[in-house]
């Protein structure tokens, strides 16, 4: 499967080598890792993968990366009610309409790998509902 770097990556990878990937760098998967050639950069389900790389087999990697990053990691003012990035109404909406995007084994709101591989249409819909800017 092809992945694309949608947000600059400058870190030491899983292989121990330091990498600098600019936006647009295409990488492939080998087993459970995103790789450049034979060298493993990071695990497909790692935080580095979610923050910097997006599945690009449908040609929508940049857009998928932009949307998932904005929803999952964008700086939002902490909510006064609960101290989190999402309001109680947004949390209820996510748990009701998008439970397939949330990890169930944790007490906090964390997006799962299905979210980061979601269809562009569904991500745009969620982006608009959350009014992410």
Image (cartoon, rainbow, N blue to C red):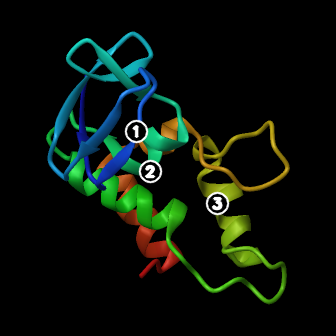
- Above or below: residue 16 compared with residue 61: above
Q: Point out the image quarter for the N terminus.
A: top left
Residue at disc 3, secondary structure: helix
Circle 2 residues within 10 Å: few <14, some 14–19, many ≥20 = many
Q: Position of residue 81 (x, y in %)?
A: 84, 85
Closest to the camera, between mark 2 and mark 1, is 2
- In this rendering, would 6 be left or right of 88? left
Nearer the N terminus, badge 2 or badge 1? 2
Farthest residue, direction bottom: 80
In which quadrant of the rendered view does residue 100 lie?
A: top right
Q: Which mark is residue 91?
A: none
Q: Residue at x 22, y 29 (%)?
A: 27
Residue at mark 2: 51
**Which callout, 3 or 2, points at the residue further toward the start of the chain?**
2
Report if the CB atoms under discs 3 and 1 are less than 8 Å apart.
Answer: no
In what element is the residue under mark 1? loop
Q: Residue at x 42, y 56 (%)?
A: 68
Tell me if mark 3 has few (under 14), some (14-19) or many (20+) residues whose alpha carbon lies within 10 angstroms of its own.
some
Q: Position of residue 82 (x, y in %)?
A: 84, 78
**In this orientation, which residue lies closer to the viewer: 98 or 2?**
2
Instruction: State how many labels appear.
Output: 3
Q: Position of residue 38 (x, y in %)?
A: 25, 11
Query: To which quarter of the image does residue 121 belong?
Result: bottom left
Left or right of 40 in this view: 75: right
| Label disc, if present, on residue 94 of the rendered structure | 3
Name which residue lies at 49% across and 73% down: 129
How far apart marks 3 and 2 lie (CA) works out to 20 Å
Q: Residue at label 1?
A: 117
Of the image marks 3 and 1, the number of the one nearer the N terminus: 3
Q: Nearer the viewer, mark 3 or mark 2?
A: 2
Asked if marks 2 and 1 touch (Cβ < 8 Å), the reply is no
């Amino acid at each position: 499967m092809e992945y694309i770097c949608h947000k600059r990556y400058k870190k030491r990878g899983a292989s121990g080598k330091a990498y600098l990937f600019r936006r647009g760098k295409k990488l492939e998967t080998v087993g459970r890792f995103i790789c450049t050639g034979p060298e493993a950069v990071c695990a497909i389900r790692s935080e580095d993968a979610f923050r910097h790389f997006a599945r690009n087999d449908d040609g929508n990697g940049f857009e998928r990366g932009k949307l998932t990053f904005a929803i999952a990691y964008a700086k939002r003012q902490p909510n006064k009610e609960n101290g989190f990035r999402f309001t109680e109404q947004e949390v209820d909406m996510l748990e009701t309409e998008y439970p397939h995007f949330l990890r169930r084994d944790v007490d906090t709101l964390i997006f799962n790998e299905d979210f980061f591989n979601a269809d562009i249409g569904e991500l745009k819909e969620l982006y608009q509902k959350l009014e992410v800017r």
